[in-house]
Image (cartoon, grey):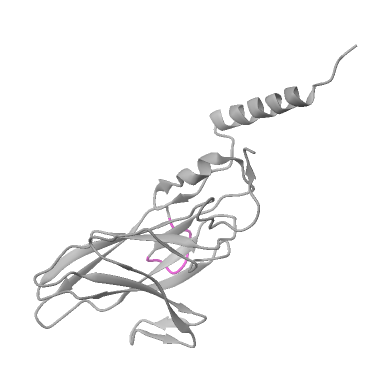
Amino acid sequence: MTRGFRPRQARRATAVTVALLGATGLMPAGAEVSARNDPATSAVTAATGTWGATPTLAASGVPAPGTVSITYSHTLVLTTAPQYFYVANTGTRTLSGTSYTVDGIAGAVLGDPVITVRACTGGTWNTSTHACSAGSVTTVGTFTAGAPGPVESAVTAAGPGTRVQLQAAVSNFGLLGSFTAVFGTRVSSSAPRQVAGPLVSNS
């Protein structure tokens, strides 16, 4: 007579199955953002879908994981105008937030540059006048050489396949200087939870 699994045996069999799936690479991918995996997803044994938010200069298409680089410069009379980039939801899950970083900010003569990233919530950016049309300005975060982030924000491309346009403006440049800022994004599946909906965890 064949005996069935006791509850504890069943749990062990499930754990072994999950471990084998992970080892063979058959598990769904974790959050891949800015060419960096989200370590918070290591606690997830099975998730329905994938999640990611990727910065890009393109207004359409599916961007490859990575970062966006923008060069800012300042002379005695001219400073780089506000620049724009997008953040695209490259996963299959709805997002409730994204964490942002800005690396590469360098000091200038008599100045400590500050980059402020903003969204035009409910409207669109006029990239010629730098005004937010038919919406309200939401500050995503401010970044300096000593404070590059990450900064957590509810501003994100919420739905899969969508994107949000962000403005990145520099201030307090000083007299002279130039640097290339590298904008990165990251999505977490645990604290701070930035993936909407349920996940299947180890517990």
- Quadrant where the C terminus is found in the figure: top right
Q: Give the x, y percent position of residue 176.
A: 10, 73
Residue 113 figure quarter: bottom left
Residue 43 position, x and y percent, is: 55, 40
Which residue occupies 11% across, 77% down?
75
Callout count:
0
Query: Does residue 83 appear in this view?
Result: yes
Residue farthest to the right, as pictured:
1
Relative to residue 47, is residue 118 depicted above or below? below
Q: Is residue 149 left or right of residue 172?
A: right
Q: Position of residue 1 (x, y in %)?
A: 90, 11
* 35 vs 145, nearest the viewer: 145
Would residue 24 be visible to someone looking at this image? no
Q: Is residue 35 above or below residue 129?
A: above
- Assess whether residue 62 is covered by the magenta stretch: yes
Q: Residue furthest top?
A: 1
Residue 120 placement (x, y as % from top left): 45, 79
Left or right of 104 in this view: 140: right
In the depicted view, which residue is nearer to us: 76 or 143?
A: 143
Q: Is residue 114 above or below residue 188?
A: below
User: Is residue 31 found left or right of 68 in the rendered image?
Assistant: right
- Residues drawn in magenta: 57-63
Left or right, 45 with respect to 76, comes to: right
Is residue 58 rendered magenta in the image? Answer: yes
**Magenta segment, principal secondary structure?**
loop
Which residue is pictured at 55% across the width and 65% down the height?
A: 158
Q: Quadrant of residue 197?
A: bottom right
